[in-house]
Amino acid sequence: MKECSRFKEHLLLDVHQEQLPEHDKWLEHLATCSECRQEREKLEAMLLKVEQAWRVPQPTSFESARLKKSILQELEKRPSSMRNWAWPVRLPVPALAGAVMIMVAGWLGWQHFAPHRMESNNPESEERLLVQEKDLLEDMELLEDMDVIQRLVQILDKKEAVL
């Protein structure tokens, strides 16, 4: 019986089809120990019953159609403001594209200012810093252009709303 207590964890792992640390020793023990074999069979039978009890039956096509119809009827009863709750603000594609470009430019700018980018003072690193500063200025100009584009999109959206 002392031998069986050593294999309790193996029994549970085996029943759940997990990786066993001492697979060969477990199989040898299982071949010689009837108590462990019976316990394993009981656990497998119980797990099978649980698995079968948890299975949800698929609805028939009639039930599916009836359920769909009742859901659509309930949705129609709601006020129109409730129907669009998932997307209350409809953003045009240019505004979204502008936001993405601003995020990318911000990330690029952050990469230039990150502490891991600092290097020792030597002519090569100073030259790299100048190139990085030039790139940063170009990124800043891009950000300013993006602000202008965003303002234009907002103005166009307001005009569309008025029309």
Image: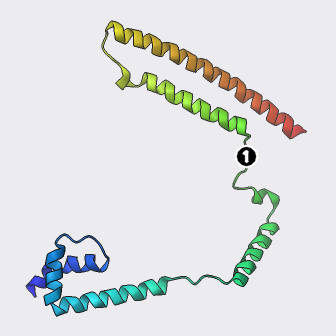
Q: Is residue 150 above or below residue 80?
A: above
What is the quadrant of the C terminus in the image? top right
Q: Is residue 119 above or below residue 85?
A: above
**Where residue 26 sits: x, y (%)?**
17, 79
Report the front residue among 31 and 12.
31
The kind of secondary structure element at disc 1 is loop
Residue, far right: 163
Residue 60 left/right relative to 155: left
**Where residue 9 sits: x, y (%)?**
21, 76
Report the front residue among 14 and 9.
14
Q: Locate residue 75: give its quadrant.
A: bottom right
**Where residue 117 sits: x, y (%)?**
37, 22
- The count of marks equals 1
Q: Is residue 112 above or below residue 71?
A: above
**Where residue 89 sits: x, y (%)?**
73, 46
Query: Which residue was labeled with disc 1?
Result: 89
Mark 1: few, some, or many residues within 10 Å (few <14, many ≥20)?
Answer: few
- The residue positioned 80% from the left and 72% from the top of the image is 73
Residue, far top: 123
Report the front residue among 56 and 74.
56
- The residue positioned 24% from the left and 92% from the top of the image is 38
Residue 124 left/right relative to 11: right
Colour setup of the view: rainbow
- The residue positioned 47% from the left and 87% from the top of the image is 53
Badge 1 amino acid: Val
- The residue positioned 67% from the left and 84% from the top of the image is 60
Residue 42 left/right relative to 1: right
What is the quadrant of the N terminus in the image? bottom left
